[in-house]
Image: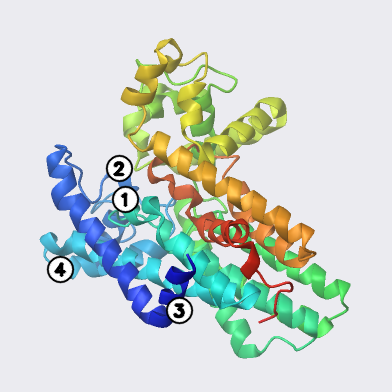
Amino acid sequence: MEHVLTMLERHGIVKCSLLLFLLTVFVSILATYVVRPLLNIERPLGGEAYDGYLELGLNMARGHGYVFEAGGHKVFHRPPLYPVLLMPLAALPEFLWRLYVAVLNAALLSLTGVTLLKFVTALFGKRVAWMSWLIFALNPFVIWAAKNALSAILQMFIYLLMVQMSWTILSLIRTQQGISSSFACRYTLILFAGMLCHGTMLPIALLILSLLAIWSIHLRNWKDLLKLSMIVFSLITLLAPWTYRNYLVTGMFIPVAGNAGLAYFAGNAHWGITSAAVSAKESRHEAELRHMNLPTETASKFIHYYGFTNPALEHHATLEMKNHLRNQTRDFCRKFVLNALEYYFPVVYYLFPPKNGGLASEPLRKRLFVHADKDTLPLSLYNFVLVSLSVSGLITLWKRQQRVVMLVLLGSWSAYALSYFPFLTFVGHALYNFGTIPIMAILSTIPLCPKIINTEAKPT
């Protein structure tokens, strides 16, 4: 391992990032043009399975507005940043679309690696940084997902930037050096980009800013507290036009993206919370509507790209979610735990399916090897190793009195993951946990290479 790390250091981040970029593009082309034809898999680049980001980008570029198809309903459940990055596809011939998506996601993945290296170098030094980069760069499930027109890798990149820059601000507050205006502007733009990438990034950004503000108050650092207040005000100003647009479309206050109610009941229908789980005789959308007391026959008409086409149904779903949270708190807590387990270990659903659902009567072998995706078991095993090493890394940092660093890494991990547990269920490729992969790569390095961890973290 020492030889590998020395070799990485000698080649430098530019060459290593280029290698990761080329590897990702190669895997995307291989998966699309070799593996899928061999397995007789026909899957378009866009469509329902990929959340409609492609369609939104194309229709914006063609002047049709923020819609899935020309003349369709105005979309209010998908954030706009990734569709904007896909707009150049409209100027390219269709046979180049897959290559563009692969190149875009590969570039974002490489930039995530660069940010990771910079962040960990500030925490523990170069040797640990390169080991963390290696663990991150060799994650096969992240690389495999780069072929799809989905925003998970973009969100992972932006979130790591948020964490890295938040650590810098924390260090500046601790040392009373002061947050410069230029850095505050860059930080504001990164937080804003995160908010436009996914709805959960809004509460995450507000949580991070709140913790930084509390730390400033604790240290009586009023100058930096004022800067943080200006960042919050700037974010509200930047987000206001998109929020107002959503209000004009729906009549509701939706800061970034709607769909919380539908996502919430998707989890209820998946696990059979309160009512029966999805059966073999109904679609997932029909089960979701049943759980929110709506006619199931409207599923194909009013749910499009996994979101409501009618704002009135969005309003109804939100009210039903609030009622369920208020009246069925125990069921919600049970779903929260189940979603947390499935977040990293999707095999749990097939090992212990809901007793009131369609899978419960199936034999275990059929559940695992017929109903489950082919990557369910290997992904669960891979994440088990990664999570175990990460927990061990946290314990090691605690024992070595590096508790500020431990709390920052644990908080960064938890803030991202916890925001998903009340909603949804596991999705293919483990897209919802991508933002935690760089953090786990850092923590996993610590028990693997305990001798090269510095005794004290350095401020940036």
Mark-to-mark CA distance, 1 and 4: 18 Å
Q: Amino acid at mark 2?
A: Glu
Q: Amino acid at mark 1?
A: Gly
Front residue of this view, candidates 456 and 181: 456
Residue 9 disc label: 3
Can you tell which of label 3 and label 1 is closer to the viewer?
3
Mark-to-mark CA distance, 4 and 2: 22 Å
Residue matched to label 1: 52
Name the N-terminal-most of marks 2 and 3. Answer: 3
Mark-to-mark CA distance, 1 and 2: 6 Å
Residue matched to label 4: 92
Q: Amino acid at mark 4?
A: Leu
Percent x, y for residue 294?
A: 47, 25
Q: Residue at x 19, y 57 (%)?
A: 29
Q: Are marks 1 and 2 in contact (CB under 8 Å)?
A: yes
Name the N-terminal-most of marks 4 and 2. Answer: 2
SS assignment at label 1? loop
Q: Residue at x 57, y 47 (%)?
A: 387
Q: Amino acid at mark 3?
A: Glu
Percent x, y for residue 115?
A: 50, 73
Mark-to-mark CA distance, 3 and 1: 40 Å
**Side of 411 relative to 292 (left or right):** right
Q: Are marks 1 and 4 in contact (CB under 8 Å)?
A: no
